[in-house]
Image (tube, rainbow, N blue to C red):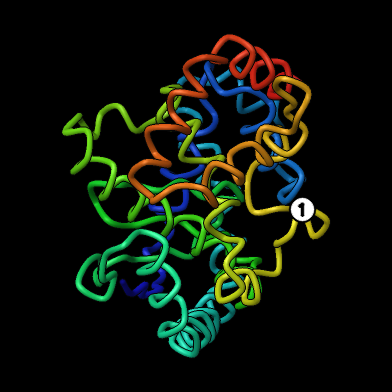
């Protein structure tokens, strides 16, 4: 497994941002854009159709993009150098976690440095986005979260023989994959290079998972216990069975959190 960081260009930034500005996007996903770019008006963007939204964002953010182009070029060098410093120990940890040699897979992952403060990942295309304001340490922490998704679903797919179409939101399989990142990240070889670990540092999973309580216990603690007690493939089954049992409560908690 290896991540190579690059600048995919201005158009990619706009396309990435628009993924979280449609009418189905909750404030949890859409509002970060306006915090980082106060020159954008949420009401102005919302009243436009997709074509108009793209034009509006392009007109205003073009100046931002060209102004930070030297910074983006510098970030490419810093992110790549920082990742390479820790590539060996990261692969050691992930190989142990997933019981496979991760050096043999996903050596073509790309981290696209862009203007989108939300960092989507694309499983089939082998790339994910990184917000340009991230430090090299922050970029590595975010990348570890995404890398775990790629390997998780690689192993999961070979175990359950289902479809990659089932691995996206709002699928329960997607929800589980977002929660289990913390259990896997607890390995000292990973947590030591992730500035967002543990929860007290902001956490390496979405905030609404960190305060989700099921059966009187934080669900992340329940999953961590299952992870410690089981081989990775047994853990996948046990964790999914647990989420299926409590799916209504899990989804209700997420829905309420994303509206705030």
Res 7 → quadrant: bottom left
Res 214 → quadrant: top right
Residue 70, given in percent of the width and then of the height, sits at 55, 81
Element under disc 1:
helix
Residue drawn at the location 60% of the way across and 51% of the way down: 182
Residue 46, given in percent of the width and then of the height, sits at 61, 21
Res 95 → quadrant: bottom left
Asked whether, in this view, residue 70 is left or right of residue 244, the answer is: right
Residue drawn at the location 23% of the way across and 47% of the way down: 124
Front position in the image: 220 or 124: 220
Asked whether, in this view, residue 89 is left or right of residue 212, the answer is: left
Does 19 sit above or below residue 3? above
Front position in the image: 222 or 120: 222
Question: Quadrant location of the C terminus?
Answer: top right
Question: Quadrant location of the N terminus?
Answer: bottom left
Does 167 sit above or below residue 194? above
Q: Would you call the spot at circle 1 few (<14 residues within 10 Å), some (14-19), or many (20 or more)? A: few
Residue drawn at the location 65% of the way across and 76% of the way down: 192
Front position in the image: 184 or 71: 184
Where does label 1 land, which residue?
199
Asked whether, in this view, residue 11 is left or right of residue 199, the answer is: left
Does 259 sit above or below residue 19? above
Front position in the image: 210 or 98: 98
Residue 120, given in percent of the width and then of the height, sits at 46, 46
Q: Residue furthest front?
A: 229
Residue 14, given in percent of the width and then of the height, sits at 46, 46
Residue drawn at the location 74% of the way across and 46% of the way down: 39
Q: Residue furthest top?
A: 248
């Amino acid at each position: 497994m290896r991540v190579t960081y690059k600048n995919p260009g201005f158009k990619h930034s706009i396309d990435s941002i628009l993924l979280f500005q449609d009418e189905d996007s909750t404030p949890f996903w859409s509002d970060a854009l306006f915090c980082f770019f106060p020159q954008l008006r949420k009401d102005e963007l919302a009243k436009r159709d997709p074509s108009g939204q793209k034009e509006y964002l392009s007109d205003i953010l073009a100046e931002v993009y060209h102004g930070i182009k030297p910074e983006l070029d510098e970030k490419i060098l810093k992110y790549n150098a920082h990742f390479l410093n820790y590539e060996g120990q990261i692969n050691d940890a992930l190989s142990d976690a997933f019981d496979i040699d991760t050096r043999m897979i996903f050596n073509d992952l790309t981290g696209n440095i862009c203007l989108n403060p939300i960092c989507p990942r694309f499983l089939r295309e082998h790339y994910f986005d990184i917000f340009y304001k991230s430090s090299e340490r922050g970029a590595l922490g975010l990348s570890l979260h995404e890398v775990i998704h790629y390997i998780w679903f690689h192993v999961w797919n070979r175990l359950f023989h289902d479809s990659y179409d089932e691995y996206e939101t709002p699928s329960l399989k997607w929800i589980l994959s977002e929660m289990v990142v913390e259990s896997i990240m607890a390995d000292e070889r990973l947590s030591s290079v992730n500035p967002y670990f543990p929860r007290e540092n902001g956490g390496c999973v979405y905030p609404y998972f960190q305060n989700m309580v099921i059966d009187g216990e934080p669900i992340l603690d329940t999953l961590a216990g299952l992870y410690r007690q089981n081989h990775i493939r047994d853990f996948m089954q046990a964790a999914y069975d647990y989420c299926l049992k409590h799916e209504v409560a899990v989804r209700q908690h997420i829905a309420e959190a994303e509206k705030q």
